[in-house]
Amino acid sequence: MAAAQTTPTARLLNLLVALTDSRRSMSREAIRDTVEGYTRVPAGASDAELKKADASFERMFERDKDALRHLGIPLLTVQDAHGTVLGYRIDATDAAFPVLDLTPPEVAVLSIATAYWEDATLGDDARQALTKVSSGTLAGEAAPVLSAGRSSAAGAAVAALLEAIEDRRRVVFDYSSATSGLTERSVQPWRLLTRGGAYYFQGYDTVRDAPRTFRLSRIQGDVAATGEKDAYELPATWPEAFSPQQGGTAVIAARPETAHALRARGTQIGAEGDWDLIRVHYRHADAMREEVLALGGAARVVEPQELAAQVAEHARAALEVCRG
């Protein structure tokens, strides 16, 4: 079969088999000559044809090396004492994946984690990892997963911010706040934070010329990196990210056998008909609002009235969206 007729997947499989079966490392020249799918040097080729064939082989081989390592296969580069590359090999014992005997509920938990990254740049890696892990699990009764409880927008923002922090690049995004409404922000991101079960990131707001902390769930649309890499330095010491004055106490009415997370954090103070009354402290009003809304009618805010009004307003807006 000619090289042009060999698909990239078939060529990669040929390389995997050759490097695994070989007792010694294979040089680049041996790989090129013996592994089906690579561009070989045509007989009687001119200098231009030789140069083109060499470049084609180098591109294909570099892509295949990266693909094998991306798949978790330990491709080893063998060097001499002077650092000269002698060849490549794969140790079959190192490449063997340990047996993971996961239960169906454990696979379900991993599925929830994978779903969080579904729309982010990490989505392909997460799905591939789940496929590898779950492929060795014996078939059994599937555990029901009622809700993954994820925020795809937040997951995508995390991935974009991590990359921007690594590259030291400024990001721009639309941000919704109670004081300013929806505005465009331009920020040099510093670090990601979690507090009260929510994601935040801290950075330098270049428009307001001051450090700011942003909640990821308030970001509207995409986070876009802009400008040159290494455009700024991280601060030597971190400024205060959260105000100690944030938070409050709420009284939540919940149906029996529901709102377990709220009950674990709070204290039941009585009952109101068929509702249990739970007093719970919260750090951020919007996080408390989202938690009550996520219970789908099994909980409502009794106090404070301002928080109860926010929950009712968001519930009505959700109904309007559902009705079209």
Image (cartoon, grey):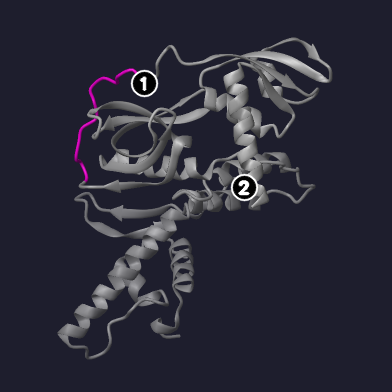
Nearest to the eye among marks 1 and 2: give it: 2
Can you see residue 30?
Answer: yes
CB contact under 8 Å: marks 1 and 2: no
> Looking at the picture, how far across and down is residue 291, in whole percent?
62, 28
Q: Is residue 15 left or right of residue 261?
A: left
Give the labeled residue for mark 1.
241
> Looking at the picture, how far across and down is residue 251, in whole percent?
66, 15
Can you see residue 100?
Answer: no
Q: Residues within 10 Å of mark 1 (few under 14, many from 20)?
A: some
Stretch of the chain drawn in magenta: 229-241
Q: Is residue 244 left or right of residue 295?
A: left
For marks 1 and 2, give the CA distance: 35 Å
> Looking at the picture, how far across and down is residue 2, in whole percent?
41, 85
Q: Is residue 90 magenta?
A: no
Residue at the spot 47% in from the left edge and 48% down from the top edge: 120
- Magenta stretch, main secondary structure class: loop
Q: Residues within 10 Å of mark 2 (few under 14, many from 20)?
A: few
Give the labeled residue for mark 2.
321
On residue 221, the disc is none
The three-letter code of the residue at mark 2 reads Val
